[in-house]
Amino acid sequence: MAAELTAHQLIATHRPTLDQALETIRTRAYWSPHPEHPKAYGENGSLSLPEGKAAFDALLGNRFDLDQPGTDDWTGAEVSPYGPELGITYPHPDIDTLLPAMRAAMRAWRDAGAEVRAMVCLEILSRISARTHELAHAVMHTSGQAFMMAFQAGGPHAQDRGLEAVAYAYVEQARTPDNAEWSKPQGKRDPIALDKRFTPVARGIALLIGCNTFPTWNGYPGLFASLATGNPVLVKPHPRAVLPLALTVRIAREVLADAGFDPNLVCLAVERPEEGIAKALAVRPEIKIIDYTGSTAFGDWLEANARQAQVYTEKAGVNTVVVDSTDNYKGMLSNLAFSLSLYSGQMCTTPQNLLIPRDGIATDAGAKSYDDVVSDLAASVNGLLGDDARANGILGALVNPGVKARLEAAAGLGEVALPSREISNPEFPDAVVRTPVIVKLDGAKPDAEAVYLNECFGPVSFAVAVDSSADAVELLRRTVRDKGAMTVGAYTTSDEVSGAVEETCLEECAQLSLNLTGGVYVNQTAAFSDFHGSGGNPAANAALCDGAFVANRFRVVEIRRDA
Amino acid sequence: MAAELTAHQLIATHRPTLDQALETIRTRAYWSPHPEHPKAYGENGSLSLPEGKAAFDALLGNRFDLDQPGTDDWTGAEVSPYGPELGITYPHPDIDTLLPAMRAAMRAWRDAGAEVRAMVCLEILSRISARTHELAHAVMHTSGQAFMMAFQAGGPHAQDRGLEAVAYAYVEQARTPDNAEWSKPQGKRDPIALDKRFTPVARGIALLIGCNTFPTWNGYPGLFASLATGNPVLVKPHPRAVLPLALTVRIAREVLADAGFDPNLVCLAVERPEEGIAKALAVRPEIKIIDYTGSTAFGDWLEANARQAQVYTEKAGVNTVVVDSTDNYKGMLSNLAFSLSLYSGQMCTTPQNLLIPRDGIATDAGAKSYDDVVSDLAASVNGLLGDDARANGILGALVNPGVKARLEAAAGLGEVALPSREISNPEFPDAVVRTPVIVKLDGAKPDAEAVYLNECFGPVSFAVAVDSSADAVELLRRTVRDKGAMTVGAYTTSDEVSGAVEETCLEECAQLSLNLTGGVYVNQTAAFSDFHGSGGNPAANAALCDGAFVANRFRVVEIRRDA
């Protein structure tokens, strides 16, 4: 087949990027090949912000064709959290036609080898990067993220996570050589010798079940880890957030075809309203890998029922910040205020429970009572979000009515330290924009525990009064062990307390951010350096991204013969 | 604590060995630090053959004390397949005392770090190596292996597999640095910077469920992979093969104590007759990893029920050899004869089904009919085992009455091409020694399929007449897909047939040996080079040993703070 893109061209273009990624996952220093500034786009074939907006607008109200086999219907009912209906319909799959077509694509993809697969993945990421502004609008109008966040998290940061997965996948496959000559001495006799050939082989078809809030950021690691290890990937987006992954699938199919591979290595499965296609797909014998981000209930169901597949889940947890003491009270408050506000607290990494000693804490600004800390934090949030334009840029919109309902119910759960405020968005008057609520709870009261030990996804935090920092650490331990946590934060100037928090996080397997007072927030992780989740507590059974995330997506077949 | 062995000493002694192991799992060339010749032992503190025998004899009829916490009884009823009762009793655990003691040992082991853990594991292996002759007798008199096999497979080869697991575990943990300084440029502003610390943390207590036939060879990979990644290991031996693992546990505990660690990092759990302790242990919440070798039924049960644990299983499969053609008929016959005879076919890797075209095959000795091939193979087995002393040295003894019963029933399954012969063992008159049986079956007959598509563990092979080599390949595919296979063999001079067999093995994920006619046999795999099992077909969900076998035995916890 005369491929438009040869392996040689792909390697010449992308091998240096892969090598830098391989180096960075070893050093875990800062690096990204994907620019974070909107103005960095618009040249060398990439779309500028207005071009990306125009490309997005052109998709609205139309069929999104992918030229996939087995399309038996068109479906789609996305409504932007900012108000407008997207009006896009997508191919609905006849699974019994689509899955065999995907399997038929596997052999050539396997025979291409790990390096070429990595190069094709990097070309896909490169073309995604060029259309970052188009994807940013797609992410914004499906997740409700504010534009800058949709641009950064949905664009370069998601692409970084995809590239990270490709790097792990490559290094994991390349650790075994393609060939070996094995020669075993036999004393005075001739050695016995074997020629051995080693081939990484895919497990089967991978299913990616996308989420509503971060369709690309949470989707790319699994997608690229599976594809780079030889598995076709069937992408099942969240019905409210189809477009970002549909664009991704379209780009992947274009690149695969240009490189001479079967585009059916990446396909889209969009469901009809209430169809629940994920459940049916997850137990199909052809599906050997599942990546899932979403509710604990369905994640647990997948782990229990999709027994024919390797299942990687990111579910929900209860994220805790221990507030013991600080030498930068103002920095702590502003850091926490931003963490609680960003994307209206709709991140799986947003802190939920702030554990504060009821007798108060020591700070560089003097002793602060529990009430002081809570009201100062409330004031800090109010300061951050006091200007409506700025607030809109940080909060984005509530992603769905469930979040709004939880927010409204939160006011009845305890004493409200910071009420939620409705903010209007002049550009999108139908957007539901709300500032976060902070509710006071007494950690010692059993009825309060039933509240704060459950995940309350959205802009709701609990300021939990605890007896002491030791009490806080014990509650932290119990929370992580029983409920899981994607993140843990702590503020303390005490070596004893930091030691106890660190030991707890090591023993209960949670990622810890200590004394963050600057421009990094507990809810943000950087690809190539930070692990997202640990895979060792109930919030997630895998971390993004590490060796375990990729090593079992393929197996190695050895063919040996007498030399 | 004043350790007898310091980290410094351990690193000076063992780091070069680890480095060589790390290099070898990359090149997959031949290497072993463990001598394969009985006479290589007896100096530098290692036991000679008579010393090993004497050490073994001294254990017989006595209590085997380990000074473990929570011993509530003494139990043990091992009888050598060669006849004698061992008369050894072992500590029976009170699990509710033992498991907490094991957990208490974890923190210091974690804090030691990956390199020191690897060094301690290598010291354990080194002391095991010095006692290879003692272990060889223990393996012989629990598995029924002949002495040379018990010595080699139970000694150096098992130690190689343990070392291989340590190497994989080390490289997997060391891929993430202990520390990173992360600094992200912010244009004209100061960069934002974080100090990051990464710690590999264990999952919890690992349970090793040993098997009867290869207690050390199949046990060491899981034991050392778990221990090297920070997990305490509870060893639950097969009740008929306790001693080899009990000796291993004793040595491990001695080394751990000498190195200043809690010996309870490695403990033994021996069950009372019919107690079924593995089932109870497997679902304990403290048990986070399980390594298992044994029947498919219990392996499937573990995978379905021990949901709190990572479960690594090696179960059973139906191993196939496709016989299409050969340019070395004599070499093929003698190679196959040895494969069928070694340890009375009681290896999970022994071929069961020999698929031979009913119209015969082409060979360098002329065309051979199906009947020729089968009778020539029978003659080759008879030649190999014609001398009783030599036969005893190859066959060993039947490991248990179940194997004997299957062997006896096999004669009724079809036309017997090679009857089994009873061989007396002058040294051990009570040993049950039998030559293998070969039974002819017609692959086209449905009632035959019900026979050859089930695993018949022991010295039973089926010469299955097939319509053609293409038919053989299709049957191979179906066998691997439905029943699993630890090994596949093929003999062919045809590129078309070898291509079809290779493609089948790549697609169905089975390890293939092609045209072996010399001193390597399909049922043998070498550590550092060959993968034992693929982890991708029903015979096993893991391969010994690869990245996936170790990567999920630990997680990495990150602690980050403002720089």
Image (cartoon, coloured by chain):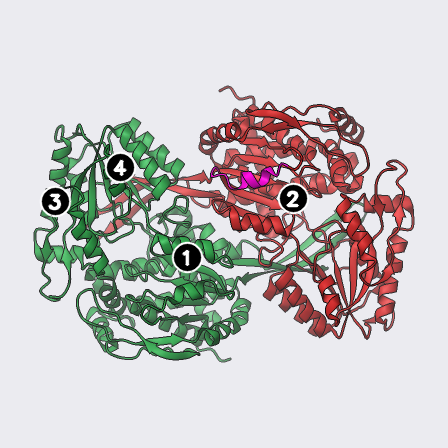
Chain colours: A green, B red
The amino acid type, in three-letter code, at marker 2 is Asn
Measured as percent of width and height from the top left, residue A145 is found at 22, 60
Do the dots labelled 3 and 2 sit on one chain? no
The residue under label 1 is A165
Of A4 and B122, nearer the camera is B122
List the residue tagged with mark 2: B218
Circle 1 SS class: helix
Q: Nearer the viewer, mark 2 or mark 1?
A: 2
Give the residues in magenta: B275-286
Q: Is residue B345 visible?
A: yes
Instruction: Residue B447: give x, y in percent of width and height.
Output: 74, 67
**Image x and y of residue B237, in percent:** 64, 37
Q: Name the side, left or right, on which B413 lies relative to A88.
A: right
Label 3 and label 4 in one chain? yes
**Local SS, label 3:** strand
Q: CA distance from mark 3 to mark 2?
A: 60 Å
Instruction: Identify the chain of the residue marked 1, using the numbered disc in the image.
Output: A
Residue appearing at x 31%, y 49% in the figure: A525
Q: Amino acid at mark 3?
A: Leu
Question: Which residue position holds label 3?
Answer: A418
Task: Say which amino acid is labelled 4.
Answer: Ala
Question: Relative to residue A95, is residue B181 drawn left or right?
Answer: left
Residue B214: where, in percent of width, then height? 69, 43
* Residue tagged 4: A490
Q: Given the image, what chain letter belongs to the residue carrying mark 2?
A: B
Does the image show residue A14?
no
Of pointers 1 and 4, the one earlier in the residue sequence: 1
Marks 3 and 1, the one that precedes in the sequence: 1
- Is B172 above or below relative to A236? above
Q: Is disc 1 surrounded by few (<14), some (14 to 19) or many (20+) residues within 10 Å?
A: many
Residue B278 is covered by the magenta coloring: yes
